[in-house]
Amino acid sequence: MTDSPPLPALRIRGLAKTFDKPVIAGLDLEIAAGQLYALLGPNGAGKTTTLRMVAGLAKPDAGTIHIFGVDALRDPLAAKAITAWLPDEAMLYDKLSPLEYLAFVAGLWRMDPQYAAGEADRLLHWLDLWEQRDTRCEGFSRGMKQKVALAGALIHDPQLLILDEPLTGLDASMARSVKDALRAQVDAGKTVIVTTHILEVAERMADRIGIIGGGKLLAEGTLDELRESAGTAGMTLEDTFIRLTDPAAHAVTAI
Ligand SMILES: Nc1ncnc2c1ncn2[C@@H]1O[C@H](COP(=O)(O)OP(=O)(O)OP(=O)(O)O)[C@@H](O)[C@H]1O
């Protein structure tokens, strides 16, 4: 008997969404489990819209979304149970301390309080927030709030972690600690999807990169594969990105 191939962490087919104009128009995207995937695209390309639909926060006009085989549109609760979404602006209850916030989030997931408290301790130590565990979040810097939100996203041990611009506005040391946390998730077998405009981050961190534009996937692959398809061998991701997203270059390349 042969083993069936592992389920992709995310499988999107024919996704479409129109606001006052079409934003996503027949997007196909498949992300294998256990990697860090960077989703890139020009401003307004629809990255956040796509990931909000994956996270169940916006409804597609057409298409399908499967998360580890779970149909996210038909069974959103099951999909959400294995997914975490971290928006670019951390949404926290500022009056709560990190410990209180994590207990609150764990309660929403109906986690056993004792187990959740252990997980909160582990996450707060790991993200270097232990000293501030009892301090209200309202006085925290953007980076500290981002880390508390990240701890909240991780408390229910999601298989798929989706982060929208997680490093924007963070200083070097805070960015390093968030990057290390994301890499550790992948090393532990989880799948991480990030959007970023910091191409150096994608270049250094991502196992694979997808570039969307014009409502579709323009190109997808490892950095070397993207360079090859763009004819930018030996050049930076920035050169490759600009070449692939140039509206004058009508190439649609999926590797
Ligand atoms: N709720 C909404 N109502 C109307 N239009 C929207 C809504 N959300 C997004 N849009 C529009 O959809 C388009 C794609 O936006 P989206 O935020 O998904 O792009 P993005 O690729 O994440 O951009 P950026 O890199 O600038 O964050 C934009 O033109 C935006 O104005």
Image: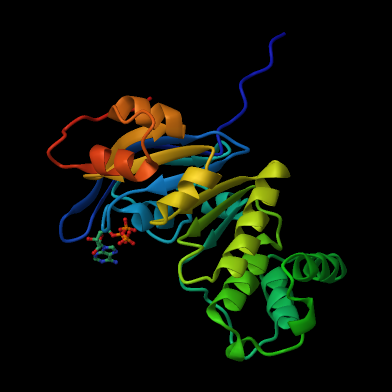
Q: Residue furthest top?
A: 1
Residue 207 appears at what percent x and percent y?
A: 54, 37
Q: Residue furthest left?
A: 248
28 displayed left or right of 161: left
Residue 125, image quadrant: bottom right
Q: Nearer the viewer, residue 194 or 168?
A: 168
The answer to whether 3 is drawn above or below residue 73 in the figure is above
Residue 136 appears at what percent x and percent y?
A: 67, 90
113 displayed left or right of 255: right
The answer to whether 34 is drawn above or below residue 51 in the figure is above
Quarter of the displayed picture in which ligand 1 can be seen:
bottom left
Q: Residue furthest front?
A: 234
Q: Does any portion of residue 15 appear in the rendered image?
A: no
Q: Quadrant of the C terminus?
A: top left
Q: Residue drawn 56% across and 67% down?
A: 172
Q: Residue drawn 32% across and 38% down?
A: 240
Residue 90 appears at what percent x and percent y?
A: 52, 74
22 displayed left or right of 189: left
Q: Nearer the viewer, residue 98 or 177?
A: 177
Q: Quadrant of the N terminus?
A: top right
Residue 134 appears at what percent x and percent y?
A: 76, 87
Q: Does any portion of residue 180 appear in the rendered image?
A: yes
56 displayed left or right of 207: left
Q: Residue drawn 39% across and 33% down?
A: 220
Q: Residue drawn 76% across and 66% down?
A: 123
Q: Nearer the viewer, residue 64 or 127?
A: 127
Total marks drawn?
0
Q: What is the basis of the colouring in this image? A: rainbow
The answer to whether 207 is drawn above or below residue 251 in the figure is below
